[in-house]
Image (cartoon, grey):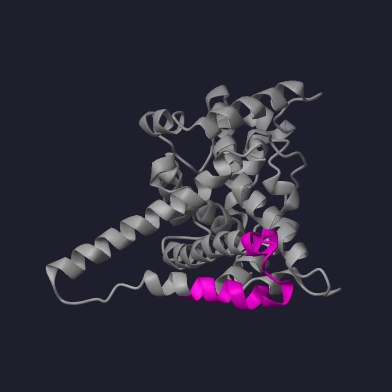
Amino acid sequence: MSSYEATSPFRVSTHDLLQLERNEAFRAMREQLRRQDCGMEGPSFCATHRHSCSSADQESFRLHRDIIHTLLVPLFLINHQAERVAARALPNKKGAEPERAFRGEARSAFAWLSCILIEEHDWYLTARCPACIVLHVLHSEPTIRFVTVAALLAGPRSGFDCWLAALETAVREDPFWGDAFWPEIEDRAARLADGVQQLVRQCHELRTTLDSPTLATPTLAKTSTTVCERSASTCTIPLKPSSFARKQVRLSREEQRYRSSLVWNSWNCSREMRQPLGGSTPNQPRRRSMTS
């Protein structure tokens, strides 16, 4: 898909929009971005999209830009908080990579988030042309995965599940990606979303340990590992071929989805969520990257 397409590849129904508008953070972010657009010295759309897009298409691009921005801000905040926690956890290890403060999938998630936030810095700030921002989602596998992870973490209770469906449809219908790419992208995004949830939990554990005057710093890693292992052991459900076991598995999955929504909602009330980020958005050729 060209960066100069005149219509958005994503579709959000009127019903879905009504559900989204019940989300307080989304409403606040839309208002802030609207004010940002009004305060710009020049037109919010680039010259190409200003002349090639109809008024209705421009409104769709603005809506989709607002959805993307609202979804990505929590991931930015999670990464920012993780960096601060890592700096506190590794105060005496100069030159140590900050991801060493975390373990397992949380470490991988932190490293991945840090990389994409650097590589796609201008894009995720979602300033300048809304159409260019929206079309850039399908620019590469990492950008698709980034937005997919954000939608997964938001959870169905946030109203953003419609965007996950819209993203899947857009990827499957895109001539560059095609139908076969979505399962791979979705699987990678699901694993990364699990890692982000672990990252949030480990940040909480590390903050609790660091803020406790009774715990010494040398025991930090051991303490947090013990907490994690104890937490993991209490969540284990023995699978048995019985109706009760199947019910337990179903309840466990529902609990996982609920916990996923809590991860996103925990950042939902942050004052930083109410402020759009600033920056610029370049146009670049699309990449078929499955290794980033």
Q: Residue at x 73, y 72 (%)?
A: 217
- Report the quarter where the C terminus lies: bottom right
Q: Position of residue 18 (x, y in %)?
A: 40, 28
Q: Position of residue 235 (x, y in %)?
A: 37, 69
* 19 vs 287: above or below: above
Q: Residue at x 40, y 75 (%)?
A: 233
**Residue 90 included in the magenta stretch of the image:** no
Q: Is residue 77 left or right of residue 43?
A: left
* 18 vs 238: above or below: above
Q: Is residue 233 left or right of residue 153?
A: left
* 158 vs 194: above or below: above
* 109 vs 27: above or below: below
Kindly report the secondary structure that dominates the magenta region of the rendered protein: helix
**Residue 218 included in the magenta stretch of the image:** yes
Q: Residue at x 57, y 38 (%)?
A: 269
| Res 192 visible | yes
Residues rendered magenta in the picture:
206-229
Q: Residue at x 43, y 36 (%)?
A: 12
Q: Position of residue 160 (x, y in %)?
A: 45, 42
Q: Nearer the viewer, residue 285 or 106?
A: 106
Q: Nearer the viewer, residue 195 or 112?
A: 195
Q: Nearer the viewer, residue 128 or 103?
A: 103
Residue 114 position by quadrant: bottom right
Q: Position of residue 150 (x, y in %)?
A: 53, 51
Residue 241 position by quadrant: bottom left
* Furthest-left residue in this view: 243
